[in-house]
Amino acid sequence: MSEDPRVRRVLGEGPRATCFVELAGGRFTMGSSLRADELPVRTVEVGPFAAALTPVSNAEWARFLGATGREPPPFWRDERFNDPACPVVGVSWFDAVDYCAWLSELLGRRCRLPTEAERELAARGGVEGVLFPWGNEPWDAGPFAFGAAGMDRPQPLGSTPPNGYGLYHMGENVHEWCSDWYGPYAAVNGVDVNPRAHAAGERRASRGGSWRHRIKVSRIAARSSLDPGRRYNDYGMRVYAGT
């Protein structure tokens, strides 16, 4: 099979290279009526951007540590959380922003965290009206199946199927930081263009599921949040690129 022309391999070599999928952006229906903080359901438009195929791995974070001399995140020496093929965890929002700044300089391209709107469009994989990145039914097999036994660590990157854009783990494995402050969505007449929830706040928004929750897979529209200085063992990040 030929490689998807949207995929751009930009850092390193082999299976752990950082790769982006170039997305055209566009209009989609954002939010849901299943939870109050996902309302109002509305039409949103975002510009083109790129999303990394996977969350940042421990192997990638190790390069960052080596280049910058930073202290490793909590859990770095715990064998449950330091597999090079697994997502880095224990990353605060500020750590994630610093990683993006370092990668921007390295690649000569602006790297950043996504807005919630960009993250939701990317998670949908080009399919409207579904609950999860793959459809409306939760998985019935594998470690992320509904009702599956609890796990004590994240799973290797690429260990579950990608969505329609080729992006992995958009609904499971680790929570991913977004750039937005968390808060109620604003009511907008017409199309909401490049929305941001709030200009300030106390918690930063995040998206995606968690290996340690009883319900480990998150719906596409589901929102979560955390104090930006906290470092939890189910919080990681994914790099986005664009204006």
Image (spheres, helix red, strand yellow):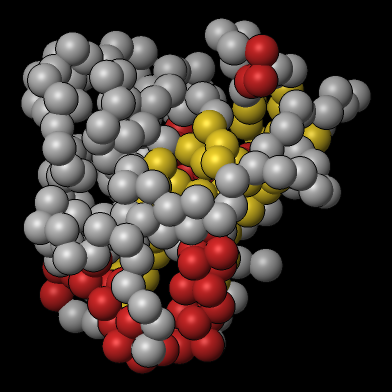
- The residue located at (44%, 18%) in the rendering is 130
In the current view of this chain or complex, which residue is farthest to the right?
189
Q: Image height check: is 204 above or below 130? A: below
Q: Image height check: is 123 above or below 158? A: above
Q: Image height check: is 178 above or below 11? A: above
Residue 17 appears at what percent x and percent y?
24, 73
Q: Residue 74 or 108: which is nearer the viewer?
A: 74
Image position of 53 (left or right of 229): left
**Is residue 77 among what the camera can see?**
yes
Residue 123 appears at what percent x and percent y?
44, 37
Q: Quadrant of the C terminus?
A: bottom right
**Is residue 51 among what the camera can see?**
no
Residue 148 appears at what percent x and percent y?
13, 18
All told, the count of numbered labels is: 0
- The residue located at (58%, 52%) in the rendering is 228
State the image quarter where residue 41 is shown.
top right
State the image quarter where residue 205 is shown.
top right
Q: Quadrant of the N terminus?
A: bottom left
- The residue located at (19%, 55%) in the rendering is 81
Q: Residue 34 or 3: which is nearer the viewer?
A: 34
Q: Image height check: is 138 above or below 74? A: above
Image position of 158 (left or right of 105): left
Residue 95 appears at what percent x and percent y?
49, 67
Q: Residue 77 or 64: which is nearer the viewer?
A: 77
- The residue located at (90%, 24%) in the rendering is 189
